[in-house]
Amino acid sequence: MSNPVSILIVDDEPAIRRLLHASLARAGYHVVEAGSARETLAALHIDKPEIVLLDLGLPDRDGLELIPIITTAGSAVVVVSARDATDQKVAALDLGADDYVSKPFDSEEVLARIRAALRHRLAGETGVPVVIRDDVEIDLASRLVRKDGVEVHLTPKEYGFLSELAKNPGRVVTHAQLLRSVWGPGHETDVEYLRVAARGIRRKLESDPSQPRLIRNEPGIGYRLLGGS
């Protein structure tokens, strides 16, 4: 039997830690807890968790400062915080967080975001083509996109946009990250470029572009590629 995935809960509220611990343990995860930045750094070294659920309001350090440290240690980060302002979400994601869940939260949503973060890690480790839903395949090695087995022509910018999302399945990629990667550093505020590219991709790949099931817009933040296998 393989070892269960290890998850570190970082929150200074014991009641929140207990709630998350119970949900994660029922789902089969190995759970470690920390109530401060100091305890978090020790747990990273000792327990080497695959995922860290990170509250930003810690008593001894701002949680945003921990994100680059955690990701450098090799763990994925899902922020679980009462800070729900768009600029805080964008800051966390730009610093390397995989996802962001606002308090109060639904435990099932947190579990879904954990599964998405694990898929992102797996895709990064294996480098295999990413298949989204059953009918759309994004072959990153060959730079090909197929729907129902038939190659679909995307413009270079559409492909660049989609491939950046495919490299991060289930993860929100911020506007600035997408624009910097696909259009270049001088276009980080040209959000309309992303809207045009998303419309083009949906028109070519979605069965009903008005009800997208492939690419989700996270208003004011970025885009997320849904599904995955």
Image (tube, grey):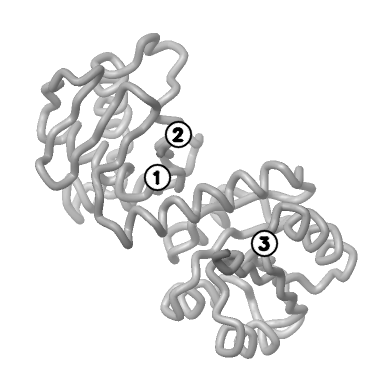
**SS state under label 1:** loop
- Count of numbered labels shown in the rendering: 3
Pointer 1 with pointer 2, Cβ within 8 A: yes
Tell me the SS state at disc 3: loop
> Which class describes the residues within 10 Å of circle 3: few (<14), some (14-19), or many (20+)?
some
Q: In this rendering, which labeled residue sits more in front, label 3 or label 2?
A: 3
Asked where in the image residue 121 lies, by quadrant, the reply is: bottom left
Please state which of residues 180 and 52 is positioned toward the viewer in this rendering.
52
Q: To which residue does mark 3 refer? A: 29
Give percent across and percent down for residue 15.
89, 64
Task: Give the crowd class for mark 1: few <14, some 14-19, many >=20 residues within 10 Å.
Answer: many
Q: Earlier in the sequence, mark 1 or mark 3?
A: 3
Instruction: Indicate which label's residue lies in the foreground, 1 or 3.
Output: 3
Amino acid type for the residue under numbered disc 1: Pro
Residue at figure coordinates x 28%, y 49% from the top left = 188
Q: Which residue is mark 1?
A: 169
Q: Quadrant of residue 44?
A: bottom right
Q: Is residue 205 above or below residue 9?
A: above
Q: Earlier in the sequence, mark 1 or mark 2?
A: 1
Q: Is residue 229 above or below residue 46?
A: above
Q: Nearer the viewer, residue 17 or 148?
A: 148
Q: In the image shown, does 170 or 25 lie closer to the viewer?
A: 25
Q: Amino acid at mark 3?
A: Tyr
Q: CA distance from mark 1 to mark 3?
A: 21 Å
Identify the residue position indicated by label 2 in the image: 227
**Left or right: where does residue 47 sit relative to residue 208?**
right
Residue 38: x and y in percent read 67, 89
The amino acid pointed to by label 2 is: Gly
| Residue 142, percent from left and from top | 10, 42
Quadrant in which the N terminus is drawn:
bottom right
**Residue in the image at 25% along x and 39% along y:** 161
